[in-house]
Image (tube, grey):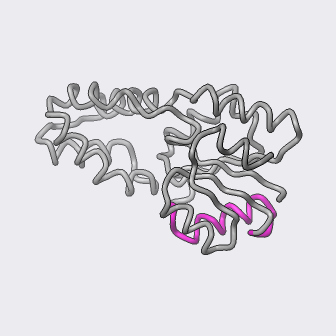
């Protein structure tokens, strides 16, 4: 195993606490907002613009979205996902100090990828790949092949952690070793 690859959302990060505030900013009931937020997320994660995404969500909940509101919703959304789980941060630091080759593979929009790359903790990763940048999403085989090309690695050389079984199965179908994320302690025990 030459590479350890992590998903971001709900693996390295805490769940977003921003969703109720986003719903309120759009004047929408939270359940209705959440349905639209997730219904249009895959195209956003696959490279559509923030304005396209928030207008689709807005249309679904009956809220007009202009450039200014889109920019604010994007800022709040990125910030909401921007909190590392302390145990995950400690695991990344320990692995990095031990010389492990770490990579990040996340279904996330371009704006989020830009934010991550500006964070101090991004230094732990030799490669960061976001679905918005490559215009395809997990669990598609294409994104795992693009990652392998970027790493210069064979599938069997990579261990991948993700919180979604479908993404783990997608990675395994391409030949990566992959496990469902059950927390940093479980990952640490598995790696030990």
Magenta segment includes 13: no
Quadrant in which the N terminus is drawn: bottom right
Q: Residue at x 15, y 33 (%)?
A: 28
Kindly give the residue lying farthest to the left in the view shown: 62
Q: Nearer the viewer, residue 189 or 80?
A: 189
Residue 94 image offset from top left, x and y in percent: 80, 32
User: Would you say residue 102 is visible in this rendering?
Assistant: yes
Up the image or down, 32 lies above or below 178; here it is above
Residue 68 image offset from top left, x and y in percent: 30, 28
Determine whether, in the image, residue 42 is placed left or right of residue 191.
Answer: left
Up the image or down, 140 lies above or below 103; here it is below
Secondary structure predominantly adopted by residues drawn in magenta: helix
Q: Nearer the viewer, residue 129 or 169?
A: 169
Q: Which residues are magenta?
A: 137-155
Q: Residue at x 64, y 35 (%)?
A: 117
User: Would you say residue 136 is visible in this rendering?
Assistant: no
Residue 25 image offset from top left, x and y in percent: 22, 26
Q: Residue at x 69, y 51 (%)?
A: 5
Magenta segment includes 152: yes
Q: Residue at x 43, y 28 (%)?
A: 80
């Amino acid at each position: 195993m030459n590479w350890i690859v992590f998903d971001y959302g709900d693996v390295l990060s805490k769940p977003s606490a921003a969703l109720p505030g986003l719903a309120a900013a759009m004047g929408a009931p939270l359940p209705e907002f959440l349905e639209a937020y997730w219904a249009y997320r895959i195209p956003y994660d696959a490279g559509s613009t923030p304005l396209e995404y928030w207008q689709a969500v807005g249309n679904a909940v009956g809220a007009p979205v202009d450039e200014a509101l889109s920019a604010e919703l994007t800022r709040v959304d990125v910030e909401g996902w921007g909190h590392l789980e302390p145990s995950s941060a400690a695991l990344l630091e320990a692995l990095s100090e031990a010389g492990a080759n770490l990579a990040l593979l996340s279904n996330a929009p371009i704006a989020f990828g830009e934010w991550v790359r500006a964070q101090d903790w991004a230094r732990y990763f030799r490669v960061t790949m976001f679905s918005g940048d490559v215009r395809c999403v997990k669990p598609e085989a294409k994104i795992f092949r693009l990652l392998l090309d970027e790493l210069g690695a064979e599938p069997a050389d990579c261990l991948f952690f993700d919180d979604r079984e479908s993404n783990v199965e997608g990675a395994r179908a391409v030949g990566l070793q992959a496990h469902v994320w059950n927390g940093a302690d479980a990952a640490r025990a598995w790696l030990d």
